[in-house]
Amino acid sequence: MEKTMNLTLKVWRQKNAATDGQFVEYPLKDVSEDSSFLEMLDILNEELVEQGKEPVAFDHDCREGICGTCSMTINGTAHGPQRATTACQLHMRHFHDGQTITIEPWRAKPFPVMKDLIVDRTPFDRIMQAGGFITGRAGSAVEANAMPIPKGTADYAMDAAACIGCGACVAACPNASAMLFTAAKVAHMNSLPQGKPEKDRRALAMVTTMDGEGFGGCTNIGECEAVCPKEISLDMIAQLNRDYAAAQVKSFFKAV
Amino acid sequence: MSSPFCNFIRSTIGRKILMALTGLVLVLFVMGHMLGNLQIFLGAEVINAYAYQLHYELPTAALWGIRLFLLACVAVHIWAAVSLTLDNKRARPDSYAAEKPVQATYASRTMRISGVILLAFIIFHIAHYTARVVPGMQYEEPGVLSPTEVPLVKGGEMVLKDGQPVMTFNVNDMMVAGFQVWWVSAFYIIATGLLCMHLAHGVSSMFQTVGLRNKIWRKRLDLVALAYGWVVFIGFAVIPLAVLTGLLQMDPTGGLGEEVAAITETIQK
Ligand code: HEM
Ligand code: FES
């Protein structure tokens, strides 16, 4: 038999970027433990619409954990209590009857709240524009064996490329640092032969943009890795530190 | 202002690397300092001879070079810590209503507090034992201690120069007298406890900062860092504890023992 639960939701409501927000409590009855967290919010919103109230705005798209659009802090943890799981893939069976669930937007200066749970994540786009690409011709896909890549390298690059850019790392970091995101992008490109020629330029440009967007610095506490739905590893931050330092040393001593 | 070096130290990673490199210097210094101090357990004459070596056998320029280098490291470490902390606070002005860390260690979350208390301690410590200017604590104060100068002893024999014993400062008694003041000992033990915490995160973190860490090494380095922190804590804290429990005593003869002390007195007269 399907189990249901009654919940109290404490949701951050904010009209727009210019106004202050506050928490509003909503009771929600008979939530199936099989529904996803976003389906639970859909149910809340249907009730709110029926009551003639403004529904809670939240970002979502694929709802299958691959697009990185959903973004909310659930009971103080980005994407909620389940490890390696986006909010859209989180199920209500991880909560219990009578529980109060606090739902907040990502909190970071560079990610201003636009409305309710929706934040503006375009600073990530600008970090990508600074170096998250290769300048080689990107016509049709090349023959797979034209450029042999060792399995270990391919796996590592794939692990880095798994980053969906959701911003949970920034949200979880007490310094709102974007190091894990930037590191994943740098590690992905810098480890593959296609990206290697621009390794130094990429590391310098992406870090400069990251800092310029107002993200904080890394204090190596590892909260980002712990909440990352794709389990991007701190090893990638170590690589970013290494690649950045090497690029800087080369630029000190470049021929003039 | 856009030379590569300026760009480097303006970046968050660059400042963090400076913090790691200066941290490394301090980490190594702290171990050396601790081993030096522990010689007090080998006898007053040993620690006094060690101090004499540092102060008079080492060229003055080298002594001051090392001191200034260490102070510069502390200054750069603090500058980077403060400027990054300000940037970090600016980046995250609001906290969550249900703020709670998922896995971050207590030590890693309190680096700034442990650091600030360490700074207060470093200032006090230099004023106390290096500059010897803490009021009410002057080692030379009459009544606190009599002879501040004792003969230098090496290999159980007084060192003579032109037939006269070479005199040196009685560091043993200065340390014992200092730690007999209970709150000095308490502050010292608390500060080295915080140093233990600071290092339990820092010693592993600095490898990550310079890019020399991965999943496997993270586990190992975290253990190394914790062990290092504890070794440093115990190594420093045993001295005030030994003083408070009476294990370490003042020795106005500087380790020469009774009969030689008599000779010393005659010489001094
Ligand atoms: C003088 C006052 C001090 C202050 C204000 C201070 C502050 C800090 C701060 C804020 C951090 C960064 C923590 C983080 O990023 O999570 C740090 C890191 C560190 N500190 Fe200190 N600290 C001080 C003294 C010391 C001392 C005396 C030592 C060594 C004996 C030391 C060794 C380290 C190390 C090894 C790191 C790690 C660097 C890294 O994360 O890459 N610090 N310190
Ligand atoms: S909605 Fe696409 S990852 Fe959650």
Image (cartoon, rainbow, N blue to C red):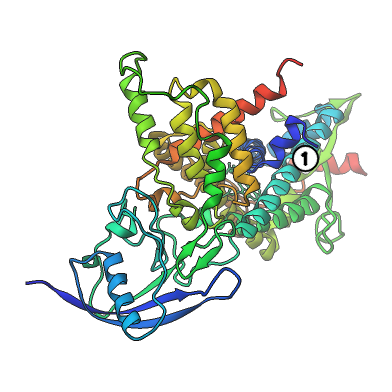
Three-letter amino acid code at the position of disc 1 = Ala
- B25 vs A83, left or right, is right
- Residue extending furthest bottom? A51
Q: Residue at x 23, y 78 (%)?
A: A97
Viewer-side residue, A216 vs B128 = A216
Viewer-side residue, B223 vs A9 = A9
Q: Residue at x 46, y 74 (%)?
A: A12
The C terminus of chain B sits in image quarter: top right
The relative height of residue B154 versus residue A148 in the rendered view (above or below) is below
Q: Secondary structure at mark 1?
A: helix
x and y percent of residue A185 in the render?
47, 37
- Residue extending furthest left? A1
The answer to whether any part of residue B250 appears in the image is no
Viewer-side residue, A33 vs B181 = A33
- A2 vs A241, left or right, is left
- B24 vs B63, left or right, is left
Q: Which residue is mark 1?
A: B72
x and y percent of residue B81 in the render?
67, 49
x and y percent of residue B52 in the render?
79, 34
Q: Quadrant of residue A159?
A: top left
Q: Residue at x 26, y 70 (%)?
A: A95
Q: Residue at x 34, y 80 (%)?
A: A49
x and y percent of residue B19 in the render?
65, 41
Q: Quadrant of residue A143?
A: top left
